Amino acid sequence: MPYETAKMFCVECGAEGPTYQGLCARDFLKKHPVVAPPEVLDIERCTSCGSFRLKSGWSKVDRELALTGLLRETIPKMAPWERITFTHVAREEDANNLSLTVKALGRFEDLQSVQDFRVRVRIKPSLCDSCQKQRGRYFEGTLQVRGDGRELTPGEMRGVRTFVIARVDRAGDPGAFVSRIEEVHGGLDFYLSTNALGKALARELSESFGGSVSSSPKLFGQKQGREVYRVTSLVRLGPFHIGDVVRYKDSLAEVTSVRPFVILRDLASGESRRFKPKDVRSAKRVDAERFVAKIEHLESGQIVAVHPESEEARPVRPPPKGRTAHAVVVWTHDGAYLSLLPAETSKP
């Protein structure tokens, strides 16, 4: 006797066909709403930065994403629906009240159901944790930027300030902020929201501007039974700038790089060597000019550089290759030297 498949009937209406928990699709959809919508939902918005507060915390997202998250977090699915997605259209009643037309799409096995409803959303003005801390000038970490044995130049002050502010803004982290900036002792102090931010900025500054990094923690107090430290990160920008002419160990050299190492090019020999910034602190700057000079090849075989203003001629070292008519030279009390840098080498 052949096997016969058992027929399924809806226990509600007796219809034959596929059933879902004993009901046909029509009766199942009538009996099981997707959600139980509330009349009103509340959401907090920071009046300072515009962030919205969801269950996961404050988030700097646009309003539509925040409303989608609010619906998903606060309106649970009804059994036996397995997955719910929401779409909505918002209409402003006033600055802090919205009327939402919502569609909730539920899925169960191979069934789908769409439930339409309206809900009022009240936006509660508030301040996020980050903005509250900023208004209170809260800080944990301090970033100090100084020159190594010198004051920062005005250009360095501007460059460092711009670098730090841009780096913090680019991070997009509401918990990362600069509480205040102070100009002190020929340098800059940045008061930052976290120790980690101070350490990261110190490392990036040293890599971008050249210099050394050190840090020192100081016990600030206790939080939930744990010791809390404030860390001061110190960046010392290198003692020299690109284009400086220095005397180091009886040699005259030009600074051709300051990061990550200081590179000194011996003006007499043309050879370059690299040093850690701390290893060349004993080097002394010397007065020098850098300009494009006329190069003359004398009948005696000597090659000289001619000062563009005084027209004084001096032997140039090391001698240029070929019969060039002009070259960038460094002009000092010691003599004229061929330079590898542009005549208008920029200094901060």
Image (cartoon, rainbow, N blue to C red):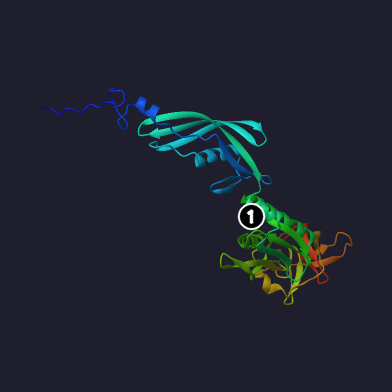
Choose top left, top right, bottom left or bottom right for residue 340: bottom right
Q: Could you tell whether 159 is left or right of 261 in the image? A: right
Q: Point out the residue furthest to the right here.
A: 310
Q: Position of residue 153 (x, y in %)?
A: 78, 62
Q: Residue shown at 17%/27% (left/top)? A: 4
Q: Is residue 133 visible?
A: yes
Pick the residue in front: 63 or 176.
63
Choose top left, top right, bottom left or bottom right for residue 60: top right
Q: Position of residue 10 (x, y in %)?
A: 29, 26
Figure quadrant of the C terminus: bottom right
Secondary element type, mark 1: loop
**Relative to 250, residue 128 above or below:** above
Figure quadrant of the N terminus: top left
Q: Residue shown at 54%/38% (left/top)? A: 68
Q: Is residue 298 visible?
A: no
Mark 1 belongs to which amino acid? Ala
Q: Could you tell whether 122 is left or right of 270 in the image? A: left
Q: Could you tell whether 228 is left or right of 189 in the image? A: left
Choose top left, top right, bottom left or bottom right for residue 214: bottom right
Q: Which residue is mark 1?
A: 176
Q: Residue shown at 64%/64% (left/top)? A: 260
Pick the residue in front: 178 or 24.
24
